[in-house]
Image (cartoon, coloured by chain):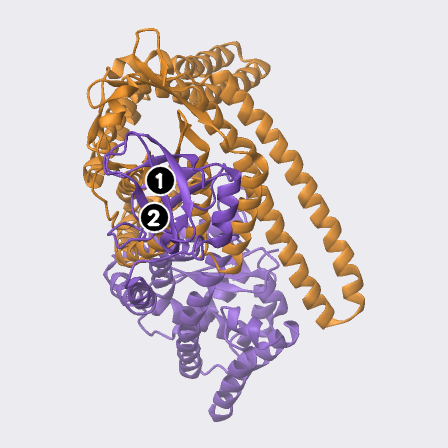
Chain colours: A purple, B orange
Amino acid sequence: MAGVAGVYFDGVTAGRHGVEVVLDEAGGALVFDGPTLEEGPLRWPLVRLRRLSDQARDSGLTLTLHADTEDESPRDPARLRVNEPGMTARLRDICPDLDRRDVQKGTYRKLALRAGLAVVAVVLMLFVILPRMADTLATLIPVEREIAFGKTVVAQMERALGAADMGALRCTGPEGRAALDAMLTRLSGGKALQYDLEVQVFDHKMVNAFAAPGGQIVVMRGLLDTATGPDAVASVLAHEIGHVEERDATRHALRAAGSAGLLSMVLGDVTGGTLAVFLGERLIQSGYTREAEMRADRFALDMLNDAEVNSEGMAAFFDHLHEMAGGRGHLAEYFSTHPASETRAEQARANAEAQEGTRPVLSEAEWQALKGICG
Amino acid sequence: MVQDVHGGNIVEGTYAGERGPLFRLAVVTALLSVVTLGIYRFWAKTRIRRYIWSSVSGGRDAFEYTGTGMEKLLGFLVAIVVLAVYLGIVQMILFYFGLTLFTEPQTPEQMLMQMAAIYITVLAVVPLIFFAQYRARRYKLARTRWRGVRFGMEKGGWGYALRAMGHWVLTLLTLGILLPRQTFRLEKYMTDRSWYGNAQFHQQGRWTGLYPAARHLFLAIAILLGGELVAVIADSAVLAGTVAVVGSVWFMIGIVSYRVNAFRYLTANKFLDGGIGFEAQPETVNVVSTVLLGGLMVGVLSALIFGGLGLAVVAVMAPASMMGEGAVFLGGLVVAGLYILALAVSGSLVLVWIIQPVIDHVAGTFIVHNAQGLNTIRQRAHDSGADAEGFADALDVGGAI
């Protein structure tokens, strides 16, 4: 059989060897020789032939041999290039493993080991080490720094809610303010708190309240509008004070700072990665807050009991919130940062049944003044 | 081999890649990456590199990329373990120190500045990014072969990270005046550690030689600063706006011009094994017009694709909404699938219409002088590559290919 022209690189030097290639089907080998080959004719067994894939010039074949080497793939470093259509077509037909992807021995064991290690490292960091570190650091930070940070967070929040200037959203009705202070005094009842509380009402329709680091609490006007009565507002305040005393906000911020980079690294490269990071963070944060929310609820009930405020107001408010949310399914509940309102309502109601000698937290006039704090 | 005017042999670069095959490869591998939740991306990158490397030829011989997807995945897992511990702890501690810098904000500006202090956590990543850049280049070289002989690069990632940070600080402090020094020194650091087989590369020339390459960059800055100054003095909003537009466009072209001309200078002053020289003559005009026209093409095609997607959403969701919740869910799945397809296609368009044409242009102007010296270069040992650019992947350093 007549040979065809080929080009051979021996994998030892960068020299280019023109060769004549003969396909010896009976002998099961590709045989080639050329004037510059010192070692004489070479025989490449067809069963060990592999071709390079995803090549730009796919009319020809660049061949290599399967071999036990230390390389990234078990391949001989030598290459043989054949362009003649007849021979390349025949080689594609008769070589059984031309397209086989061989991997080095022990690769899958290595893969399992490293994947396991990576999962363990990430899980340990996210759920054990970073939360512990956040707890420790949150107690180490000087209180005045925490207060400064909290004020910045509140200012930032105000901006995000659409205030043009600092303090533009703050409601300052003097009678409402007095009612709010009366409520706070009643709740704290002379108890020594770790932080001086600074409670703001923001003129915004959102039904919510936040605790920022360092004793900063923000109540939205929407919450006052929706609340079923002053007792309900008092219970929300008590709940937020619970967050403040536990330094929950500071801890969240620290924990988020530690886990954000990590999460975006693990999930970041998938198409639509930002969404994945957001959801991942949300899942972790909500798991954390559920625990924190429960603690804050417990704290709130104790506070209401000490202040002789009826926790039925809290129960009614949770029922109301639950109705507003339309009793959505469990998926939404899991993703929300607050535990199910139904459960919380039951807890507050059970507490209310055991309460004795409660009295309203505000008079009707004070309550109307508080509702009108934003003018 | 072709002879050059001085009687030495030359090897000329060519590029043989085509739009169709690369586009198909990019779309298919992008979809596989999505379906496998991102795991296939290591193989996707590998296959695209194999195609592009094999498109580049020196003389009659194509380059070969021998990296594997598996080693990239293994390297990524190593990087994850190291970075999980490092990033988690260091970023939290940095954030803590960021917090201790806080004071009570008096003005909105102060408030914004303090919030910016939170981004102090980014500092944790900076040395790693430079480290990852060096390692990625080392890995790419170690997996590149020409005529069966490996390229390679010595260890030196941390040395590079240290120098890169120092140069950046100097460049920023001098308002960019020392940028050529940074470019030259960092390139020299890498080139002097690079090998083809048993032959070493050397970067010669001087860093001041890069100033001509930076002329449009500095000119743009001069226009911006000087023009705005005049505009302020003349109190003319029209002049200020005009200067801003002209200056910014000039600045962007200046960046491309700097990169192209710096590449020409650095290539012309690279030597392999003492006597083998190089030459590359890419044109700024060509690169800019390729990027502009390609960008226009990608923009138009992407707009058509996403417009079609919008129509498809209406076509699927309108009937589905009549048929109840199950149909809406299925319709949502179809829409999500189409969305992913659209993303994959528009990402691949960038590769095919911008990146490949630029590589094509640069490779086509590449010449190796005194190429007879190449024949005696011998193979070098395999480099295990340790993390196989896992750090670069985890930190998202280093672009499309």
Q: Horizontal placement of B395 versus A85: left or right? A: left
Instruction: Give the residue at mark 2.
Output: A44
In primary-sequence order, the first of circles 2 and 1 is 1
Same subunit, labels 2 and 1: the answer reads: yes
From the top left corner, tell me how far across and down residue A315 is, in percent: 55, 82
Query: Disc 2 versus disc 1: distance between alpha carbons?
Result: 8 Å
Q: Which of B299 and B120 is in front in this view?
A: B299
Q: Looking at the image, which residue is at 51% across and 64% down?
A: A209
| Chain of the residue under the numbered disc 2 shown in the image | A
- Amino acid on which the number 1 mark rests in the picture: Phe
From the top left corner, tell me how far across and down residue B364 is, in percent: 45, 22
Q: Horizontal placement of A159 versus B9: left or right? A: right
Q: Nearer the viewer, residue A83 or B196?
A: A83
Q: What element carries label 1?
A: strand
Residues marked 2 and 1 touching at CB (< 8 Å):
yes
Q: Nearer the viewer, residue B197 or B37?
A: B197
Badge 1 local density, few (<14 within 10 Å), some, or many (20+)? many
Q: Which mark is residue A265?
A: none
Q: Looking at the image, which residue is at 55% across and 78% down?
A: A341
Q: Can residue B180 be seen in this view?
A: yes
Residue B110 vs A151, above or below: the answer is above
- Amino acid on which the number 2 mark rests in the picture: Trp
Q: Residue A32 carries which label?
A: 1
From the top left corner, tell me how far across and down residue B393 is, in percent: 37, 48
| Chain of the residue under the numbered disc 1 shown in the image | A
**Residue most toward the front?**
A1
Q: What element carries label 2?
A: strand
Q: Looking at the image, which residue is at 51% across and 83% down?
A: A311
Q: Horizontal placement of B258 versus B209: left or right? A: right
